[in-house]
Image: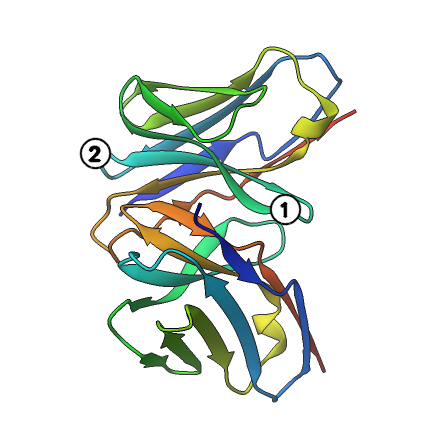
Amino acid sequence: SQTIHQWPATLVQPVGSPLSLECTVEGTSNPNLYWYRQAAGRGLQLLFYSVGIGQISSEVPQNLSASRPQDRQFILSSKKLLLSDSGFYLCAWSGGAGVAGELFFGEGSRLTVL
Amino acid sequence: GEDVEQSLFLSVREGDSSVINCTYTDSSSTYLYWYKQEPGAGLQLLTYIFSNMDMKQDQRLTVLLNKKDKHLSLRIADTQTGDSAIYFCAEGSQGNLIFGKGTKLSVKP
């Protein structure tokens, strides 16, 4: 069966510090991978998606970047965090045998920037 | 661009029915989805409806789709305290979904 893991689950970082959130998927190959951010009052915002190794599409301009060094690994990074980067970050994948277009989400990483 | 709108809060009493409404703009979506997010967790697909259907029933859940008005609703019968969560409406295809802001359902005993 397929599983998705993301870590760390909770992170408190000072403004200006770097960020690295990691996500891995098991039990499937060549998944589409996504990073979403859930900020209070703003719902779920798609940040990046990837259809293959090294292929990253950005939905909104921002202080963050994403990389996909391996087929089932997706990393969200920042060189210098801003207060506005605080939020709940969700990794997801699609392409499984379930409902067409269904997304499978990780448990999330809560980032607080102070 | 595409947009999905839903009310932010809904409060019901245990045993009552809950109805969560959603409007969307992209009429080309193949599926429309309802996802559920429990506190501190990721989202899970709750149910979905194919765009050429009007209604889908799955145990306590009923999804109604009005394509003319681009209106989607989720009805939860006999709402339980375990149904307390945030419910997201979503549209799209190929995994590139547009989500609403989520409706927080509170169930009071």
**Where does residue B31 sit, x and y in percent of width and height?**
30, 61
Disc 1 and disc 2: Cα gap in Å?
A: 32 Å
Q: Nearer the viewer, mark 1 or mark 2?
A: 1
Where, by quadrant of the figure, is residue A82 drawn?
A: top right
Please determine whether, in this image, residue A88 is positioned above or below residue A103. above
Residue beneath the point at 43% across and 79% down:
B61
Residue beneath the point at 67% across and 81% down:
B12
Q: Which of A95 and A72 is in front in this view?
A: A95
Asked which secondary structure carries label 2, the reply is: loop
Asked which secondary structure carries label 1, the reply is: loop
Q: Identify which amino acid the numbered label 2 is placed on.
A: Ser
Q: Name the residue under label 2.
A: A29
Please determine whether, in this image, residue A3 is positioned above or below residue B38. above
Residue B15 appears left or right of A105: right
Please, which chain is the residue tagged with disc 1 on? Answer: A
Q: Name the residue under label 1.
A: A42
Residue beneath the point at 53% across and 72% down:
B21
